[in-house]
Amino acid sequence: MKLLSIVALIWICFASGCGQGSTQKPMPMRKWIPVQPWQTSNNAKDHAFSKIKIPQIVLFPSKKTFFIPKRWMPWLQDHGGNIATSREELEAVAVGQGEWDSEYASVLNAAFPFDRCCVHGGATPWSAGAGYRDVQLRVYDLEMPADKACEQFVAKSCEEIQRIIGHEIVPRTQKSGRWNRIVLSFDLRFYDYIATANVDCFFRAVGGNTIVFAFMHTQGNRDEDTITEIIESFDPEQLF
């Protein structure tokens, strides 16, 4: 009987995390409400959108194009639904629905008006964890100069990241050809794991507007080939 009591005590201790190898503490519930999408115009005719003309995506109203990356094509051809182009499709992906996507959407919604988002795409559809599994992309056509767009992104998105994780981060900036690239990296902690989120934006002046390619990914350099493929396929001189 005494032996059973000792065994029971050991089991209770192990199950409650007293074991020698148990150092992880459950993540406390976060009191965080994501930023909701906002818009600059109530006139639907002013809202940005895009059209798929395989192998390209045409952005409106600029009529500039970029090529659909190779990693996106299998799902697009077999299932569809992984590239939102119409306003109805875009509104359906304006916010996230779970871990990673909620945080990514909130960081971008804090900085950019969603009525100026032309397209949202990825190798798989936007859903809980899509921003963790593969790189997701939003393209914006902002009615402001590039320097102002960069400043707004750093100020508003860094403020939102601090609200999510509880401390400041330092943006990484670099010149990438004719693009200004700004990367905001921050660790997201969930109940049983931690990983680094990257909101990785490329800014380029086109006419009086600014085109922004906003990538969301966790894989770091492993996503660089897809990011480079997309950025290099954009032609500011080409009109569809």
Image (cartoon, grey):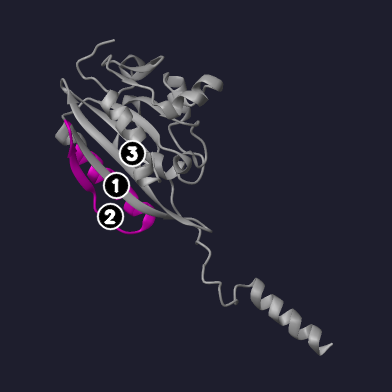
Label 2: state its secondary structure. loop
Q: Amino acid at mark 1?
A: Leu
Q: Amino acid at mark 3?
A: Glu
Residue under label 2: 169
Q: Amino acid at mark 2?
A: Ile
Can residue 122 be found in the magenta stretch?
A: no
Q: CA distance from mark 3 to mark 1?
A: 15 Å
Q: Which mark is residue 184?
A: 1
Q: CA distance from mark 1 to mark 2?
A: 8 Å
Q: How many marks are shown on the rendered structure?
A: 3
Query: In the figure, residue 179 lies in which quadrant?
Result: top left
| Residue that extends furthest to the bottom in the rendered view of this protein | 2
Q: Residue at x 28, y 37 (%)?
A: 201
| Horizontal and vertical percent position of residue 40 | 29, 27
Task: Give the mark toward the camera: 3 or 1.
Answer: 3
Magenta region: which residues? 150-178
Label 3: state its secondary structure. helix
